[in-house]
Amino acid sequence: MKLDRRLLGLLGPERWLVVLIGSVSLAAAVLIVLQARMLSRILSAVFLNGGDLNEVLPWLGGLLVIGSLRSGAVGGIEVISGWLAIRIKDNLRRKFLNLLLDSSPSLVQQENSGEISNTFINGVEALDAYYSQYLPQLVVAAITPLTILLAVFPLDWLSGLVFLLTAPLIPFFMVLIGKGSENVTRRQWQALSRMSAFFLDTLQGLRELKQWNRSRGHAERISRVSEDYRKKTMEVLRVTFLSALVLELVATISTAVVAVQIGLRLLYGLMPFEQAFVVLLLAPEFYQPLRLLGQRFHAGMSGVSAANRIFGWIDSVPHLDKISTKTAPLFQSGGVIRFENVHFRFPERETAALRDLNFEIRYGESVALVGSSGSGKTTLASLMIGFIQPQQGHIWVNQHSLAEIDPRSWRRQIAWVGQRPYVIHGTLRDNLLLVAPQADELELKRAIQQARLDEVVGRLPDGLDTRIGEQGAKLSSGEIQRLALARAFLKNTPIVILDEPTAHLDASLEQVLEESILRLCTGRTVLMIAHRLPTVMRADRILVLQDGQVIEEGNHLQLIDQNGFYARLVQGYGGRL
């Protein structure tokens, strides 16, 4: 038997469906016994006692009713089992998606997106067989044989004893086979995840593969990965067929033992026909649920293998019940964001990304972060957004700790404009409304004009309703940056975080976007990760980071006068700090 406690825990509010399955199974088991007794009585009356049709006609009507009810009960179990699987899969997908949306982007980026997609779709779908087949059959296999056993013992204790001794053989062999099947099924799931991840990576990098003339060579690697999955699947099927053969053999032999000992006693007149026939009819019904359980055991194993990956990912991100529901205070005039002795280290690194960080950002102030690659600029921005939490120290929003604030309500007050904005596969309108679904046409038009995106919209064949392809395939880098700026204007938040949005653009286009960026920053609190000297010089205050610490702080002229690290950066300026 394979009962995973965490999979059982997912039943939660759906436990009543399992109880309903058990109740219907008990009713079906009682009907099986009544059907056998009724059929045995009819045959005995007709063939042994010489009864006519009129005499057995009421019993035939009762047999028809019992058969109909039994068929309805079996169909009912299947329908209820389907409901159970659908509801649990839906709940799990919602939980998985909520955790994915609430987790830190840096955590998600550490995972392979193809494997996450495979887990979310195929992994959850693999649980269907566990909840719609294996678990309900486990309930049936626990109730039906026990009900039949209780009915057989009063009729014939010897046959009941044979049932009692042979029944455990099927679960016993099932467990023995399951120990090897578990490893094989886990390897098959891992092979499927690798294949899914590899294929998605290939699609995403197809342009580079063609540029380097490596698409054919990569196709051979895809073929090898697919072949590995085929072999793992054949291993699972081999174990499945062999186990089915063993379990069928055990069930058949057990039924034969019952039939032989009853036949011998009938031959010597030691047992009445009606009683013996009831037991013979019940014998295959007794073993049938156990045989089906053996067949569906492998479906349960596939579900457990998928669940291990699902729960492994869920365990790696914060649970929703650990996230505060306290609404973030409105950041307005007089507000301040304060970093107090903040320390952060990524789990896979020995050295801290940020150490003893102490500074504050006042409402309406523009602060630039300057430092070499790896100095902690992006980590600091992630802390401010609430993507990650410091291991030591506090981040305060006015008098409220950021750790005690609902991060979703806090992020509603922040607009992010990065170097590589994400573009969904949809229309330009879809991409804009991504940040403000309730925005009307007037607000859209204003944001488009402020970001200088109106020129782009005018060139597109269907305007805002033009499909721009995955990752903005129909837009240039500059047009994608204008889209990102338009999103920021449309969201209209008091705080803006800029991660050098003009870093990969030519000088002429950079000048156009700089005007929009200046307009966006006016009257707002701005944190900018900056590499270009003109951008840095516009900031009210500059924080110079080195090895995760603020080593210098002040405006451009003050830092030049200090003749320190920043001054040396400016002296060696070649376009980037």
Image: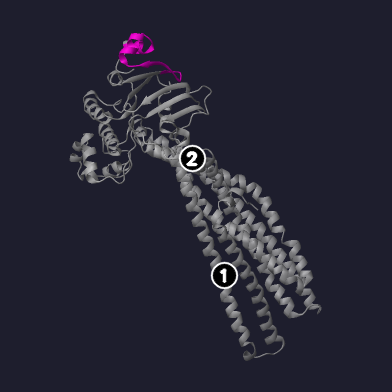
Q: Disc 2 on helix, strand or loop?
A: loop
Q: Nearer the viewer, mark 1 or mark 2?
A: 2
Of 332 and 309, nearer the camera is: 332
Question: What is the quadrant of residue 373 in the picture?
Answer: top left
Give how far apart the Cα atoms at labels 1 and 2 are: 45 Å
Whether residue 507 sits left or right of residue 211 in the image: it is left
Vertical placement of 567 versus 223: above or below?
Answer: above
Instruction: Judge left or right: residue 470 versus residue 251.
Output: left
For disc 2, the neighbor class at 10 Å (few under 14, some 14 to 19, many from 20) is some
Look at the numbered disc 1 and give the secondary structure of its residue.
helix
Residue type beneath disc 1: Ala
- Above or below for 251 versus 127: below
Q: Identify the residue position indicated by label 2 in the image.
A: 323
Q: Residues within 10 Å of mark 1 (few under 14, many from 20)?
A: many
- Magenta stretch holds residue 561: yes
Residue 261: numbered disc: none
Where residue 163 appears, as percent x and y from the top left, is 74, 65
Q: What is the image's colouring?
A: one colour
Front-most of 244 and 23? 23
Q: Quadrant of residue 188?
A: top right
Find the magenta span and give its range.
Answer: 545-570
In terms of sequence position, does the residue under pointer 1 or pointer 2 come before the other?
A: 1
Above or below, comparing residue 540 to residue 111 in the picture: above
* Residue at image location 60% in from the left, 58% down from the top: 295
Could you tell me residue 546's position as x and y percent? 43, 17
User: Could you tell me residue 530's position as x and y percent?
Assistant: 33, 22
Q: Is residue 448 visible?
A: yes
| In the rendered image, the vertical position of residue 232 relative to residue 155, given as above or below | above
Q: Quadrant of the C terminus?
A: top left
Residue position marked by numbered label 1 in the rendering? 73
Amino acid type at mark 2 = Ile
